[in-house]
Image (cartoon, coloured by chain):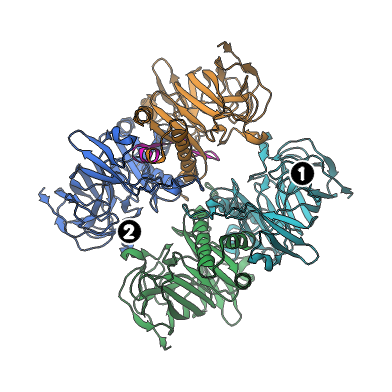
Chain colours: A orange, B blue, C green, D cyan
Amino acid sequence: MAHHDFTPTVFYTTIGPHEPVLTVDAGDTVSTSTADARGRDRDDRQVAPRGNPMTGPFFVRGAEPGDTLAVTLERIVPNRDYGITSPRIAPGVLDPGTPIADDEVSECRWLVDAAAGTARMVEPETALCRVPIALAPMIGCFGVAPAGGQSISTATSGPHGGNMDYRGFAAGVTVYLPVSEPGGLFFLGDGHAAQGDGEIVGTGIEISMDVTFRVDVVRGGSIRWPRAQNDAWLMTVGNARPLDQCVQHATTEMLRWLETEYALPPIVSHSLLGQCVEYDLGNVFDPAYTMVCRVRKDLVTRVRAAL
Amino acid sequence: MAHHDFTPTVFYTTIGPHEPVLTVDAGDTVSTSTADARGRDRDDRQVAPRGNPMTGPFFVRGAEPGDTLAVTLERIVPNRDYGITSPRIAPGVLDPGTPIADDEVSECRWLVDAAAGTARMVEPETALCRVPIALAPMIGCFGVAPAGGQSISTATSGPHGGNMDYRGFAAGVTVYLPVSEPGGLFFLGDGHAAQGDGEIVGTGIEISMDVTFRVDVVRGGSIRWPRAQNDAWLMTVGNARPLDQCVQHATTEMLRWLETEYALPPIVSHSLLGQCVEYDLGNVFDPAYTMVCRVRKDLVTRVRAAL
Amino acid sequence: MAHHDFTPTVFYTTIGPHEPVLTVDAGDTVSTSTADARGRDRDDRQVAPRGNPMTGPFFVRGAEPGDTLAVTLERIVPNRDYGITSPRIAPGVLDPGTPIADDEVSECRWLVDAAAGTARMVEPETALCRVPIALAPMIGCFGVAPAGGQSISTATSGPHGGNMDYRGFAAGVTVYLPVSEPGGLFFLGDGHAAQGDGEIVGTGIEISMDVTFRVDVVRGGSIRWPRAQNDAWLMTVGNARPLDQCVQHATTEMLRWLETEYALPPIVSHSLLGQCVEYDLGNVFDPAYTMVCRVRKDLVTRVRAAL
Amino acid sequence: MAHHDFTPTVFYTTIGPHEPVLTVDAGDTVSTSTADARGRDRDDRQVAPRGNPMTGPFFVRGAEPGDTLAVTLERIVPNRDYGITSPRIAPGVLDPGTPIADDEVSECRWLVDAAAGTARMVEPETALCRVPIALAPMIGCFGVAPAGGQSISTATSGPHGGNMDYRGFAAGVTVYLPVSEPGGLFFLGDGHAAQGDGEIVGTGIEISMDVTFRVDVVRGGSIRWPRAQNDAWLMTVGNARPLDQCVQHATTEMLRWLETEYALPPIVSHSLLGQCVEYDLGNVFDPAYTMVCRVRKDLVTRVRAAL
């Protein structure tokens, strides 16, 4: 149950079977930092390439292919006072042929006030500069080395995680990822001080972060898509296109969870989800889109107890 | 500002330019009832055909093509004590090839306790029978006569509304629909005592309802997709397949709303949505799927004031 | 086996249970004409509304719901010497954000030379004006009254047929449509002198046509999507979005055909399609897209004989 | 202009920046062989892992990132007398909920007679065993190392090529691929003796092949998706989901080709494609689907000459 303080010096823009930067044990916690999506750190230095550079990979002793890596995001805190956003909704998120706003602004700058818990646009000068919004720090991209020896760009996502850009991946969440390589090889980066659903402008408020996480290994598990939970919710993730397919992956994974680990019979799992499921939109910008299927944990627990 | 009590005797399973059942004025309220999706009423009588039979159409004096009909859902209350659900998640919502649960149950029965505010499965006997869930009454299908003289099945949806099966269409919401025929011709039905996102089993808890709504006419308007608001949210709706296209319609309609009625310049509307938008899943079961784009009304109001 | 010469005076832009313009018997042939997609006839007169106005409906005695209407397109010949095209590929067919060609041309005019069998652009003046292309006359939109009493815009398509814009719907083809209303109620229009796959500019070479067709009734049949055949091919049609869903509808309908009418066991029907099926793209422009699944008739016949 | 005979001993199931197996010059030809999709060679030995093992990569001297690799498939000939197919259409290609044929057959065996130019099912015993089909040898999977240092599974495809399973990739075709790594790093494998459009059963007639190809380097080029040509056609390829997006990629790439290399003004390129384009379906089975956009080369050449 050691604690590691790790300062990254190497950054990858693919998630794959790369040389580990640190080896840890199951139960350990790691405090580290992430560069922003453009590769700039807490001091605004260009320490990494653009394109969601990752901190990691972290090798977790004992994690073997077929196991499940559990990563608890304990702390996600912006470590500088500004973030960057893109000023335009992506054409793919609007009706084909919608005129593209002809504006010369190429990026917006936001002042991030961690103490006040707010972010406020400061450049360019617009009405938004007078309406701060709430901070809601999250990690846009994380995952483990994918199956089959692949190395996959941090622009996209898949069963291994990756660039999911889901607002729900915030402090207090434990995420579960399918281990395909020895040690799992966990990567993380692409922090957002806040973000709307869908990451429809192609960015959250992009910022470097201090992150503390804890790793555990679940023997076996055979999950096929990322899962997650916090105090309130069980969540499953589908990454694909179109969104319909994300819904299929996430819902099928949730059924597997409810039927396997909670032993709910099909009529119960189907009826429970039918009347109580909720879906969240992760990204609708990246090469693969993301939908999250979730159900209240207390409801599942009470149904389980009533079997 | 008259009030009308209307008891339906005719029910349609298409939304189109049908003979009005009642003519009302802008500002009037109507109290009426809806049969359930299978055509059964408060007394469990088969009063209408199966397939989302509609109460209406209501002709609103003064509503002309190009106008917008505003309908405030003031009260939606189950008028009997049981509802029906389907026991299986639709194959289209799961990964292709997922085995279909081989269960002989063809429907489930739920006891609806309006006083307690709960619904509880009572048949078949399962663990769910011991875990009541919260009532959250909503209207699954409503709309106005579509453009071009079409009559469209209440199984599906479009720019005119229709079978959207969105949990957010509950009491307290004002919905806006594009008028294509004189009088607008408003229809409603398909009440659910509760429903998960997506209506993934193909039903909510299907039940007959007492409904009170108020109609108003907005001159012009030129909305292209349904809009809605309640105390907290502005909402726009996209109905199509795949879900990606729903997102496009709903987001484009929200931009039009923010830029036209709230006069937000593009950099503000795009940046505001980029960091603050939320999306809800309506149905992912019917021929056309539904996504809802929403943004907090107080946020829009404050930004508007800061222009 | 009568022959009818019919001159249309009424045109519909929805396909639905409208008043028949002519009643015919199974086995009869009809020679008639169609206005172009903009409602202009052989003499360039505006005889009908824009938006794929239909000639018909034709009531076929004895066709009852559950039957199948067989329509053989015997002759499709442009009846004037010019056609119109749109000059730009639709934004939805190109990558989101592709700049829209900033050209003031709103339509192109083509000279149609039926004797020479060619079409040649004549306005505006471009290199294409010196390269005639081959005529390949086809009917873009036809169908029967849809299920459930619906009236559906001729902009779109469905199980009833409609605006499929498939190049293969040319003379020599027999199409099969599911009868939902007494008499079937057959409509046709939207002729193209030629068209690329997908109708990606939103038009073929739009032209008025002389058409001769023959109607027959197949008792029962229970087809769910349009089918067709000519000397060489069996074809099935799926109309939906996205194209993936069109493929699903068309392939499933082809399996039903092979397994029901040709009595092929599943391992034969699946293996035959697996190694020999072809797919054509109908439209990728209209609200519902179209894919056609086809297999060589002689191959199916030989396999049938070898059972 | 050397000729190389190369016998593979190493096989990869990802396409990425792997150690080259042979270095060649632009203009060289290579004769080599490919194992089948399951890793079996001409002698039915298991020489490679399952899952589309690739022969290669071949390093082409002088090919630099930003260049285009041109590979002419000169000869593709089955080098043994049997091939294997899967007996069932994939669930994702059929309507959701279509019952899966309950057959114990897990694979079918075909006799491939290169001299006669036919393939004939031989196991299990069915009517298809008496109806030989025509051989049409093709390469299902080939490509170059992808952008960004990625290694991507040979189960799928992308801008770099990969598992496209397009019947048109046969002898006589020159394919163009975007170079991302020095030397390009060309891989090939997954031969099919014949295949229906879409590879809807998940296989063609899977067989090992003798292949001869020639490599050339086009300086610059800046293609974004694979292109190809043979005597008759110009072709562009889109790999994605849903098929709609494949159409977008392929059509946009074809426009770039026509407007850049053939200098067609937009009104000509759009109008030409509008009335003359054709689309083919590659695979509709793999993680990314494939559509091919094509236009007759002689038509483009004549239009070019008429500018």
| Magenta residues (range) | A269-290
**Residue drawn at (64%, 66%) of the image:** D127
Label 2 sits on residue: B153
Residue C118 coordinates in the image, percent (x, y): 60, 76
Q: Could you say which quadrant of the image residue A281 lies in?
A: top left
Q: Is residue B3 shown left or right of residue A150?
A: left
Disc 2 vs disc 1: which is toward the camera? 1
Rendered position, C228 above or below D169: below
Q: Is residue D115 shown left or right of residue C263?
A: right
- Report in which chain the residue with disc 2 lies: B
Residue A206 coordinates in the image, percent (x, y): 51, 27
Rendered position, B46 above or below C218: above
Neighbours of disc 2 within 10 Å: few (<14), some (14-19), many (20+): many
Q: Which amino acid does label 1 sit on?
A: Gln
Residue D217 coordinates in the image, percent (x, y): 78, 47
**Residue drawn at (65%, 25%) of the image:** A182
Residue B226 magenta-highlighted: no
Q: Which of A178 and C293 is in front in this view?
A: A178
Q: Do labels 2 and 1 share a chain?
A: no
Dot label at residue B61: none
Name of the residue lying farthest toward the top: A2
Name of the residue lying farthest toward the bottom: C2
Rendered position, C223 above or below A76: below
Name of the residue lying farthest toward the left: B2
Q: Could you say which quadrant of the image residue B172 lies in?
A: top left
Label 1 sits on residue: D46
